[in-house]
Amino acid sequence: MKFVDEAKIFVRGGHGGAGCVSFRREKFVPKGGPDGGDGGKGGDVIFRAAQTHHTLLDLKYRQHQIAKNGGHGSGNNRTGRSAENLEVVVPPGTLVKDFETGEVLADLAAAGQTFVAARGGIGGKGNAHFKTSTHQTPRFAQEGLEGEERTLLLELKLLADVGLVGFPNAGKSTFISRVSAARPKIADYPFTTLTPHLGVVKHKDSPAFVVADIPGLIAGASEGLGMGIQFLRHVERTRVLVHLIDISEETHTAAWKNFTAINRELKNYNPQLLDKEQLVCLNKIDLPAVREKVKKTVAQFSKKGIILHPFSAATGEGLQDILGKIVTLLDNTKNLEP
């Protein structure tokens, strides 16, 4: 299934049904009073978050969500049928924004949460409501009110406990495929991963947690370079960031440069991202070109007050230690809102 994390849609509630102009017509009652019924209510457009959906792909191709109109009133004081609400199912983690102003209208972070995106119009009153002592035969009724309408922008932010960040080809996809059942495309060239991937990880007796492989972060990503900010939103809901660094084709000093470059992009996108717990890892130590640089690289980070954790996603060396540290960080942040 294609992954789509943004969709622009138009929503409109159903119009209310019109009230009825009618008079009683009974044998031996030559001048029956007004008996026009009210119109029914138009349907609402309601968003509901459900685990059955993982992408906004459906809405990308169904950009008009219009609820049905209410039924018209009829004689004998019969009220028109109220229309059923139109339910639009979205993945948990969907933000609903006003397309014109950018205002966040709803954050459907959990399955089961709902949001009324457009209310249906109320039905008009029939002429039976307008009879007075001086006006016994009103020959008018109300039209139903129009339903609300608006253009919305939906943004999906993945719900994950841990976000993998780093430059392309740093080994994020290999990491997530090694520790979970997720199977992203893996190859030895940049931008292999073009969509986010989620993997569920179980480490020893600790509760399972969800890891998100966030693709496309390069210098300038917050300004739209590479895959741009298209995927940066997905790290906002995570509690822990695991920063993978690859220096297999660079000197040991490049590790710090890569680390600061990615953090600069995170800060430019949202300064609060730097408040998250971050585990910094040096990947690919199975390669001789990296192993010979490990000591110098670890020492360089140590001087900056940061612990660098060497490991190999390919062979699994040091991986269990990484997972244990992730579990500890998650325990420390379990009471914090992502």
Image (cartoon, rainbow, N blue to C red):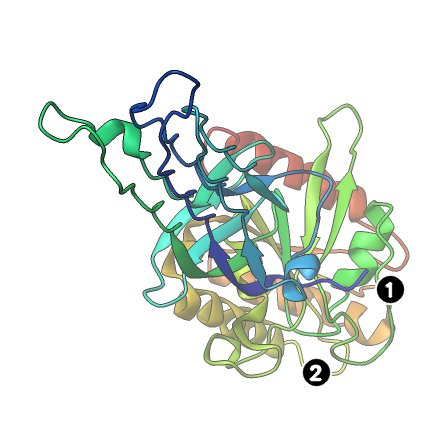
Q: Which residue is mark 1?
A: 286
Which x, y percent locates residue 246? 71, 71
Residue 124: mark: none
Which residue type carries mark 2?
Answer: Glu
Which x, y percent locates residue 123? 38, 38
Q: Which of the two residues, 254 or 190, is positioned nearer the viewer here?
A: 190
Q: Which of the two residues, 262 or 112, is positioned nearer the viewer here?
A: 112
Q: Residue at image x 14%, y 31%?
A: 135
Outermost residue, left side:
134
Question: Which class describes the residues within 10 Å of circle 2: few (<14), some (14-19), or many (20+)?
Answer: few
Instruction: Give the quadrant of residue 189.
Output: bottom right
Q: Which of the two residues, 263 or 300, is positioned nearer the viewer here?
A: 263
Q: Which residue is mark 2?
A: 250
Instruction: Give the quadrant of residue 298.
Output: bottom right
Note whether residue 156 is visible: no
Note whether residue 282 is visible: yes
Q: Is residue 122 above or below residue 7?
A: above
The span from disc 2 to disc 1 (Cα, nearest Å) is: 15 Å
Q: Residue at image x 33%, y 47%?
A: 143
Which image quadrant: the N terminus?
bottom right
Outermost residue, right side:
315
SS class of the residue under badge 1?
Answer: loop
Which residue type carries mark 1?
Answer: Asp
219 with respect to 140 (left or right)? right
Earlier along the polypeptide chain: callout 2 or callout 1?
2
